[in-house]
Amino acid sequence: MSQTNTSLLDEVVQWSQETCRQELKSVLPQLTSLHHKSESWDDHIRILKIITEMFLPHVALSELEAECFSKILPKAVTMFDSMMKEILDQVGGLSSQNTELCSLLRNILQAMMQIIDALSTCVRHVGTFEEAPDLEAIRSLPTCILKVLRETFQHCKDSEVVYCGRLSLVADLLQGLFKEAYTLQKGLLELLDRISLESSASEEEVSDIVTVIHSLLDICSIISNLDIALHANTWKFLIKQSLKYQSLVEEHLHHGDISSSLYDNLLASFHNCVELAEQMKHAGLQEATQSPEYKLFQKSAKMCRFFANTLVHYIKEFKCFLTKYCSCFHQLYLQIISKFPPSMCALALTSALSEELNAGALVPMEALLLQLLPLRPFAEAVLQQNLLLSPQHELPQCLLLVNVLGQLYSQPEEVLQLWYTGSQFSEDTPRLPLYQALFTVFRRCYTERQVPVLLPGVMMKGQAQVQVTLYHHICVQLCASVAALPPVYFPMLERCLVSAVLQADTQTALLATDVWCFTARYGTAELCLHHVVLVAQLMELVSRFPPSDVENLPVWRHVLLRALSHDARHRVETDITGLVQKALTDWQTGGHKLGQVNKVNAVLLSLLAVVQGQSSSEEQCVLSAMRIITQLWLRMSPDQVQAHPVLQCTLQLLLSISAVLVKNIEHQVILQALLCVDTVVAQKCADQLLLAALEFLSSLGKIFVPPDSQNQILPRLSSLFGVLLSDRFWLLHQHALEAFSHFAEITNHEEVISQSLCDEDTKTRVVNYLSKTVNAQEDAESRLQRLKLETAVIEQHNEKLENNKENASNNLAADTVVDSEPSPKRARQETSAEEAYSRYIQTAESALKALKVLTEGKADTTAPPPQWLESRLQELQTLITHISTARHTT
């Protein structure tokens, strides 16, 4: 600086306030010019302090921006940035031994504090005016101050990294720098709060206030971990300004950045609460309400509540600008809910901690959901088809949908349509109807259903509130929703219920059935009228899909026949039984071709549905079914069953039907069935066939075997039970225990029980099962992990079942095409003569093997072979020789 300029400064500092006021017009321009030209930090700070402390108090409000702020503040920001850069360049060499560098850095920090102090002086001066200033009258002030504040807070936040292990050398000055910046921001926000923009504000003023809001947003991201009070107050002011000037700024604000920052701060505060609660639990401090840890938990919970309520308020005011972020809000809801009971990853907290956390996060989520309900993108995010959820978010998704059901009562028609109907047009983003989405996600909560997790039940007058299972909770909420459902949505509801009833998961189907029963019994008048129409439609089903046509049989397999009227039921049963008999007759007259067995199996499946619905063994359809299965049993050859999978399917159906009709079956038919079962048990066959065999064996406890047949039937029965009870596959073993237990409870042939338990290990397992003894107690954690592993297996099994249904439908359609248009090339099939040879030789082999068992005493019979046996065997040998000789001569 020149000698002349130095002399001017030396002279000015000696002036009184009155002299400064008098010389303001002539000297202030000179000082601002010198300030702009100053290159050294010392000169800059000296001139800045002279201007702000001696001349600024005499500048009129209308002249502040043009004569002072616009000329000195940008330069102050530039100098501040250069000081910050110098620190970052020099700090690498800082150490307690390098006193010169330490002194330099401390001097720079002190100079930065002086700049902040000068800015605070500017703010205080503007605040002295009685009237609130226009924003354009101080336009440079907030912009420049916010830049300095951002850099200051960022430097303080990064101080541990910047100064590494040498922070103690400057810690006192950094603390002072932060306090000065804190005070400056407080003063600036108070000043800006006094300012008001009219609806006719200029574009520049609107741009300035938008810049202020976005600058404060940047500062919020920096100070989140520095000071809780500063962070909260900054956010309060940011939101207050956004709402104060909503009509002016709403189209200019970065709504995504603001909502995302609130989202992140909410999650950070919430996770901090959860971590603190977990630490307190492990340290045994959950009850210590006066401990520092508890106080910190309370502060975090308070911040969590603040950010949650702020986010809800912001969404309420600017929801039309936030539609593209609805999927994020959906994920936020799931993440929060997943940390609360009944989620299995929720912490077990004391009532005090739980209340704090509930108020901080759980309660605001209900308000959040209420604001998001009318938004189509939110419904699309929640109800999207094939929604991918992590396992810990499946239960929260289920509870979210239940909460949606509970809040729809008070919503307008367009919101009901949005959630209840699903996507209607091809151009819509695909979304499921609410009820279908709920059944779908309930099905995926397998582990939670098995544990089971518990939720608060509905409060009943005069009764204490109890905990209920997830099934119970959702069933009650669904029924309450159905009771208030407008009639226009009944068809949609019933489509969802039909779909849920027919899918593979048993509990989901039961839930849909319970809801359907409620719908029919306790619905509104409109609903009852609707069900009268449904009954009429069900009657029409008989005429529209006559059971006398083979292609309609898949429909009647899924209809509960006893729910039909007597006449309709009789017609359906008669038609199905007639179809089965016709298919059997066609197969017999066609030479019992193996290639036609599939058609027999298809009608047998429908016959099973018929007999399962019978209450009396004297009904005509039961007698007809008996004749049919007797004919089939007598055609079943154990060796053929072993060789041909299609006959194993026939055997499975025959066993299931015979288990229902066992009291009417002749004993030689039972023996034939046991021979076939013995064959398949001896080889590796499908599990469902073995389960059908167990069902049949269990049903034999209902009958009394006459003495002349006991030697043939009872030993085989004992042998089969013994083999199946010793199976180590847990599912088959469990079913074997259940089947044997049921048989033992009702049978008159107690000797079968003892003979089935020859093996000591098997006997022990059966005794333990009957006495409900648990050999190894499973701890809660091990059980939970096992259930989680089972979930994937069960779901894969259910999907396989449903895929098989689809494939069966496709195959049925394909079979229809094949029957009408034969393929040009067919696989070679056995001729009628070949089938006859095969059938008769296998029958002979089966008879000889049975005779061998008798002669070797393996049938546990005490009667000696008859005297004529030897001569008859000789005759058979001669016959065999003759057949063999005749074959060679031809």
Image (spheres, helix red, strand yellow):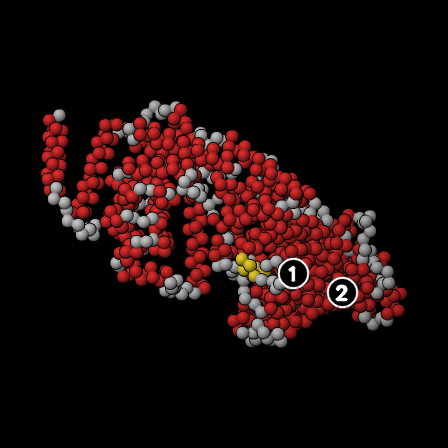
Q: CA distance from mark 1 to mark 2?
A: 56 Å
Residue 743: x and y, percent?
35, 53
Q: Quadrant of residue 99?
A: bottom right
In this rendering, is residue 302 above or below 685? below
The C terminus - image quarter: top left
- Give me the residue at 53% from left, 49% from top: 511
Specify the quadrant of the image occupied by residue 139: bottom right
Circle 2 is placed at which residue position?
A: 187
Q: Nearer the viewer, residue 131 or 552?
A: 552
Q: Which residue is mark 1?
A: 461
Q: Residue at x 40, y 39 (%)?
A: 622
Q: Amino acid at mark 1?
A: Lys
**First in sequence: mark 1 vs mark 2:** 2
Q: Judge whether residue 48 can be spotted in this image.
A: no
What amino acid is at disc 2?
A: Gly
Indicate the quadrant containing the N terminus: top left, top right, bottom left or bottom right: bottom right
**Could you say whether the residue bearing mark 1 is in a helix, strand or loop?**
loop
